[in-house]
Amino acid sequence: MMNDLVDDCELCEAARFTHWYHEDDVCWVADCEACSTPMVVWKSHGTRPSDEDLQWMLTCLEEAGTQRFGKGTGSIDRTMRQVPEHFHAHWRDPNWLSRRWTERPSTYSGVGGERSLLK
Ligand SMILES: [Zn+2]
Ligand SMILES: [Zn+2]
């Protein structure tokens, strides 16, 4: 079932604070507020996307990662630490652990386009 949203889930809420790389009917890709690297989030609350949706989401995530860090830099991390009941995956570049301390966070400025940083 699509877009089966849950009230107190932060991924269902999909607040737009950081840069959004992509959005479509299946998913959205934005900088994670905690990690500051691209994160793909399924638009349905659950952990079992179809293979088709899963492949599409990972493709969208890789595209955002490539756009941000360059081709072949980083990998997909499907561990769901913070919200285990809602499918999402992170893009991890080699410096992701220190990034949140060394870089200003991005800010929302529309889907796609230029990635701008918080002042
Ligand atoms: Zn959710
Ligand atoms: Zn994160």
Image (tube, rainbow, N blue to C red):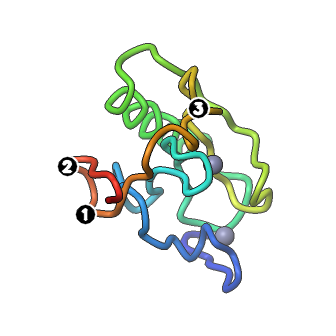
Q: Position of residue 3 (x, y in %)?
A: 55, 73
- Which residue sits at x=68%, y=80%? 6
> Quick check: 51 left or right of 105?
right
Secondary structure at badge 3 equals helix
At mark 2, the secondary structure is loop
The residue at which mark 2 appears reads as 113
Pointers 1 and 2 in contact (CB under 8 A)? Answer: yes
Q: Where's residue 85, x and y in %?
A: 78, 62
Residue 96 numbered tag: 3
| Residue 75 to residue 11: above or below | above
The answer to whether one can see residue 23 in this image is no
Label disc, if present, on residue 110 of the rendered structure: 1
| Gap between marks 2 and 3 measured at Cα | 22 Å
Front disc: 2 or 3: 3
- Going by the numbered disc 1, the residue's amino acid type is Gly
Is the CB atom of the residue marked by disc 1 within 8 angstroms of ligand 2's nearest atom? Answer: no
Crowd class of label 1 (few under 14; some 14 to 19; many from 20; radius 10 Å):
some
